[in-house]
Image (cartoon, rainbow, N blue to C red):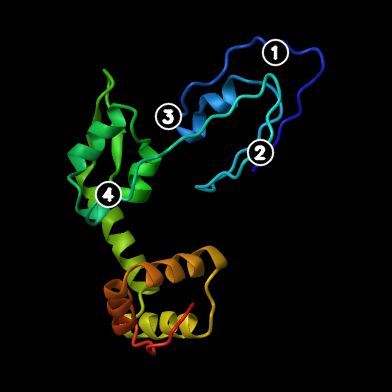
């Protein structure tokens, strides 16, 4: 989160942002002068606003389906050309290295893309852990009451609303019949 102070003599009738396509060069940073509050949180709690305040909420897509590294690099380049994705994020997320061509199109560098994707796979392998270890840690967290309150309340509500769901949940996590988060 960062803030920029507004000076008394600045024109409050200035242009204001209506979208923020590329977060590294967004309208939110370029257009309004004043105090900025930027948050990467996906949930904003209620806050007071004053006359002249601008609120810009940007949603950057959803989780999608499948492995991002399996996405056709040409389709990723089309997204860059259409300003739906920046070139740096294409490389970070999809492992696609693309270069801008004259005329506004983007060309995929196949060799660099293959290398970038292999690098991402290698990093995944270094961070990976067996599912049985993850499962044991998560089950221990459930049994020890290590859930944040909103999640614990969601589980309590779900258990109360559906006996079938509760049975499946308890069976999957090998929890005692009287389990309550």
Secondary element under disc 4, as helix, strand or loop, is loop
List x then y, in percent, for residue 141. 49, 81
Residue drawn at x 38%, y 80% as measured from the top left: 134
The picture quadrant where one finds residue 98 is: top left
Residue drawn at x 46%, y 35% as measured from the top left: 58
Secondary element under disc 2, as helix, strand or loop, is loop
At label 1, counting other C-alpha atoms closer than 10 Å, the crowd grade (few under 14, some 14-19, many 20 or more) is some
Which is in the foreground here, disc 2 or disc 3?
2
**Residue identifier under label 3:** 21
**Residue identifier under label 1:** 12
Say whether residue 21 is left or right of residue 84.
Answer: right
Q: Are marks 1 and 4 in contact (CB under 8 Å)?
A: no
List x then y, in percent, for residue 175. 38, 87
Q: CA distance from mark 1 to mark 3?
A: 24 Å
Q: Which label sits on residue 134?
A: none
Q: Which label sits on residue 47?
A: 2
Which is in the foreground here, disc 4 or disc 3?
4
21 to 123, vertically: above or below: above
Residue drawn at x 49%, y 77% as measured from the top left: 181
Q: CA distance from mark 2 to mark 3?
A: 25 Å
Instruction: Give the mark, 2 or 1, whose residue is nearer the N terminus.
Output: 1
Q: Which label sits on residue 64?
A: 4
Q: Are marks 2 and 4 in contact (CB under 8 Å)?
A: no
Instruction: Give the mark, 2 or 4, whose residue is nearer the N terminus.
Output: 2
163 to 114, vertically: above or below: below
At label 3, counting other C-alpha atoms closer than 10 Å, the crowd grade (few under 14, some 14-19, many 20 or more) is some
Name the foreground residue: 163 vs 89.
163
């Amino acid at each position: 989160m960062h803030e920029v102070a507004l000076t008394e003599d600045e024109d409050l009738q200035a242009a204001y942002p209506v979208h923020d396509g590329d977060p590294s060069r967004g309208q939110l940073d370029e257009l309004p002068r004043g105090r900025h509050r930027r948050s990467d949180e996906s949930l904003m709690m209620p806050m007071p606003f004053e006359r002249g305040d601008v609120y810009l909420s940007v949603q950057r897509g959803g989780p999608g389906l499948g492995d991002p590294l399996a996405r056709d690099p040409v389709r990723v380049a089309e997204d860059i050309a259409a300003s739906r994705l920046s070139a740096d994020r294409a490389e970070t997320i999809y492992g696609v290295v693309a270069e801008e061509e004259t005329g506004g199109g983007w060309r995929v560098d196949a060799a660099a893309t293959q290398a970038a994707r292999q690098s991402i796979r290698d990093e995944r392998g270094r961070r990976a852990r067996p599912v049985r270890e993850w499962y044991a840690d998560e089950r221990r967290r459930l049994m020890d009451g290590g859930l944040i309150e909103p999640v614990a309340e969601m589980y309590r509500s779900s258990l109360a609303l559906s006996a079938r769901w509760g049975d499946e949940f308890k069976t999957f996590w090998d929890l005692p019949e009287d389990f309550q988060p």
